[in-house]
């Protein structure tokens, strides 16, 4: 595990989820209440990229069947998904966003 720069802070401060690939893993980055968050970018229900979904408060809505996941914990909070998604420790260092992967 190591902190790895994945984006510039300005890239996610606009509020839209951002897709990045790190060490072969697809990850979605979010900005919420002045903090960065990172989750798997792949829905746990079927194959869909959550970065193409809709961020509503602290929840990302899958663009395919509208399952919702809490970006802070990865918990599935609305079906049809019932399996959580992975989350990653995330921090801002200067103008960089880093995740621990
Ligand atoms: S693929 Fe995400 S809810 Fe079905």
Image (tube, helix red, strand yellow):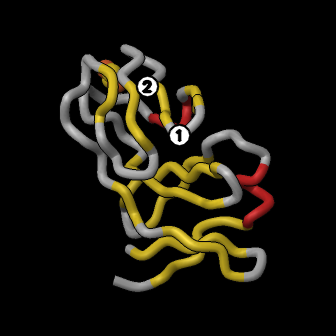
Left or right side of 34 for 57:
left
Residue at the limit of the structure toward the top, as seen here: 65
Give residue 54's quadrant in the image.
Answer: top right
* Residue 93 vs residue 7, the one in the foreground: 93
Residue at left 48%, top 56%? 38
Q: Secondary structure at mark 2?
A: loop
Label 2 CB sits under 8 Å from any ligand 1 atom? yes
Residue at left 45%, top 65%? 22
Q: Position of residue 64 (x, y in %)?
A: 41, 17
Where is the N terminus found, in terms of image quarters? bottom left
* Residue 15 vs residue 43, the one in the foreground: 15
Residue at the limit of the structure toward the bottom, as seen here: 2
The image shows residue 60, relative to residue 12, as above or below, that is above
**Residue beneath label 1, please?**
58
Labelled disc at residue 62 = 2
Labelled disc at residue 5 = none
Left or right side of 68 for 30:
right
Within-10-Å neighbours for mark 1: few <14, some 14–19, many 20+: some
* Residue 89 vs residue 11, the one in the foreground: 89
Q: Position of residue 28 (x, y in %)?
A: 50, 49
Q: CA distance from mark 1 to mark 2?
A: 13 Å
Left or right side of 35 for 28:
left
Residue at left 43%, top 25%? 62
Instruction: Please state which of the two labelled residues, at mark 1 or mark 2, is closer to the viewer.
Output: 1
Q: Quadrant of ligand 1?
A: top left
Residue at left 70%, top 53%? 12
Q: Secondary structure at mark 1?
A: loop
Left or right side of 64 for 56:
right
């Amino acid at each position: 595990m190591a902190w790895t720069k994945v984006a510039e802070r300005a890239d996610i401060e606009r509020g839209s989820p951002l897709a990045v690939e790190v060490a072969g893993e697809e990850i979605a980055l979010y900005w919420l209440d002045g903090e960065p968050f990172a989750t798997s970018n792949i829905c746990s229900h079927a194959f869909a990229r959550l970065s193409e979904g809709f961020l509503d408060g602290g929840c990302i809505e899958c663009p395919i069947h509208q399952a919702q996941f809490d970006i802070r914990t990865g918990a599935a909070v609305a079906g049809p998904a019932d399996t959580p998604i992975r989350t990653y420790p995330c921090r801002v260092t200067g103008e960089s966003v880093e995740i621990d992967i």
